[in-house]
Image (spheres, rainbow, N blue to C red):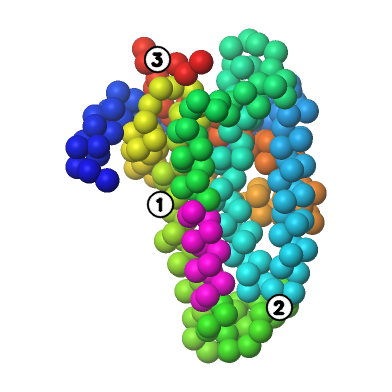
Amino acid sequence: MSNKMTQQAVAESRSYAVRRIPMLRPLGWLARGWADLMACPVPGLLHGLAAALWGALIVVLAADRFWLLAGAFTGFLLVAPVVATGLYAISRALERGEQPGLGTALRAWKPDDHRLVVFGLLLALAGTGWVLTSAALIWTQTGAAVRTPVDFLRLVVLAPSGALFETWMALGAVLAAPVFASSVVTLPLLLDRQIGVLAAVFVSWKTVLTHPAPMALWAFLLLALSGLGMLSVMVGLVVVVPWLAHASWHAYRDLVDTSGLAERN
């Protein structure tokens, strides 16, 4: 990446100011996200069903390979924002007083606009990288096959020596934190405004650095609710995925001041 491109992206990102929010504002995003899901449930529930089926497929394919499954589920969380792009469009339409439907969600992926695809591929690469890193760490450090959740608990979480679980958690946090900071408002921003991918990432980082405590709370809520959805044998994801997607749109609208800047139609 050239220095000139970076400078241009930084200059472009400065057009987007970050609003100040109170610590508990993420709870309000959840409330408004739920209202959007209730106002237009079909597209959201279909997205959630697709996510739940994908999660179930992961379980089936890696049923006796928990060393791979553990990373696959956490990697899934990294790429979830791009899956929700159509639901951002639903929330955007509701905000405008329109009556959106499934077509609204599908039209969010314009074939002539590659920005969303580019960023989606970047998230997919990040997710794949973590899956492979997690699998390699567990496979090489346990000294035995980790095929089931009980194996993971016994050989990784409760390992009699070393700090494998702590290392696994720390490595996941190190990899996940910059991905979260790079994506927390990026996809809604790309959907809503004419802005380059790198500039949108810079806006996302500015948002997180301006509000570290509220954004840490938001990250915890995303992780906790997603985890509950997975623990319910994936069934909870049918509701959790669209709920968090709609809430993420309201996070973007609260955090980023886009007044006076061109919208993406």
Query: Label 1 crowding class (10 Å Cα cut-off): few <14, some 14-19, many 20+?
Result: few
Q: Which residues are magenta?
A: 125-137
Look at label 3 and name its amino acid. Ala
Q: CA distance from mark 1 to mark 2?
A: 30 Å
Closest to the observer: 49 or 219? 49
Q: Is residue 55 left or right of residue 163?
A: right
Q: Is residue 251 left or right of residue 204?
A: right
The residue beneath circle 1 is 178
Spot occupied by residue 204 in the image (x, y as percentages of width and height): 39, 38
Please say whether residue 148 is visible from this viewpoint: yes
Is residue 22 in the magenta section? no
Mark number for residue 229? none
Look at label 1 and name its amino acid. Pro
Please say whether residue 237 is visible from this viewpoint: no
Comparing marks 3 and 1, which lies closer to the viewer?
3
Look at label 2 and name its amino acid. Arg
Instruction: Evaluate if marks 3 and 2 touch, with contact meaning CB atoms under 8 Å apart.
Output: no
Q: Residue at x 72, y 51 (%)?
A: 54
The residue beneath circle 3 is 262
